[in-house]
Image (cartoon, rainbow, N blue to C red):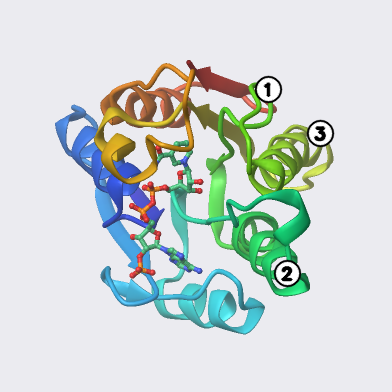
Amino acid sequence: MKVLVLGGHGTLGSAVVKELKESSRNYEIITAGRKTGDVQVDMSSEKSIRNMFKQIGKVDHIVSAAGSAAVKELENITQEDIMFSVNNKLVGQVNIVLIGSEYVKEKGSITLVAGIIKDKFIKQGTMLASTNGAVAAFAKAAALDIKQNIRINCVSPSVFNESMEEYGEYFKGIKPVPVKNAAKAFVDLIESDKSGEEVKVY
Ligand SMILES: NC(=O)c1ccc[n+]([C@@H]2O[C@H](COP(=O)([O-])OP(=O)(O)OC[C@H]3O[C@@H](n4cnc5c(N)ncnc54)[C@H](OP(=O)(O)O)[C@@H]3O)[C@@H](O)[C@H]2O)c1
């Protein structure tokens, strides 16, 4: 079974790849990123997503482990921050479902990534909260609406232990989790028959 892991060389994506390799199901893994990965894609560009799928063809499952949003005080958020956050975290993943669903085989799945900062709020986290919330709502609604016989889910992880050095100062009061726990949630969803679920890893 072929699995496309977007952001497969990042903190989350590489943990998902490791978990897939440890599964008994013998997955063939394709990683994608702007600069890293087996194939190049910029998820903020529809054209780039279409080019990637033309190159790789049909897959059984897609995991999205990419996307970012601005972390900034409300009064300092610029139009560029809004567009960056919406395009990277939300529109990119929406387009992965819209375009990617044409390339996922029957009974396959697409799993998106949201995050804890839609339920538990932090200072400077408005763009994270709003884009995470939109991704989770989109995944649940799209699962009902999708014409193809494929499943759509999302994982909302807490901040990872492995990312605390980089992001810890922003996530005060939020209990971190090992990235392996989040990666396991993605693989469990792939191997389940669930659709329209948000798995919270916190
Ligand atoms: N880190 C955390 O604690 C945490 C917690 C909860 C949720 N999340 C969410 O999990 C996701 C991954 O986070 P992470 O910490 O693993 O990030 P990361 O380590 O920075 O990795 C991001 C990966 O995505 C790729 N990427 C970034 N922008 C892309 C784009 N526009 N198009 C295609 N690929 C792109 C990067 O590769 P290239 O550089 O080659 O493009 C990289 O492989 C994000 O959505 C984040 O919000 C993270």
Q: Position of residue 16 (x, y in %)?
A: 30, 39
Q: Is residue 182 visible?
A: yes
Cα separation between marks 1 and 3 = 23 Å
85, 201: nearer the viewer: 85
Residue that badge 1 annotates: 119
Q: Residue at x 27, y 53 (%)?
A: 29
Residue that badge 2 annotates: 83
145, 134: nearer the viewer: 134
Q: Position of residue 35 (x, y in %)?
A: 32, 77
Q: Is residue 189 above or below residue 26?
A: above
Q: Is residue 1 visible?
A: no
Amino acid type of the residue tagged 2 in the rendering: Met
Residue that badge 3 annotates: 144
Cα separation between marks 2 and 3 = 28 Å
Mark 2 in CB contact with mark 1 (< 8 angstroms): no
64, 123: nearer the viewer: 123
Q: Position of residue 68 (x, y in %)?
A: 53, 56
Q: Is residue 51 above or below residue 23?
A: below
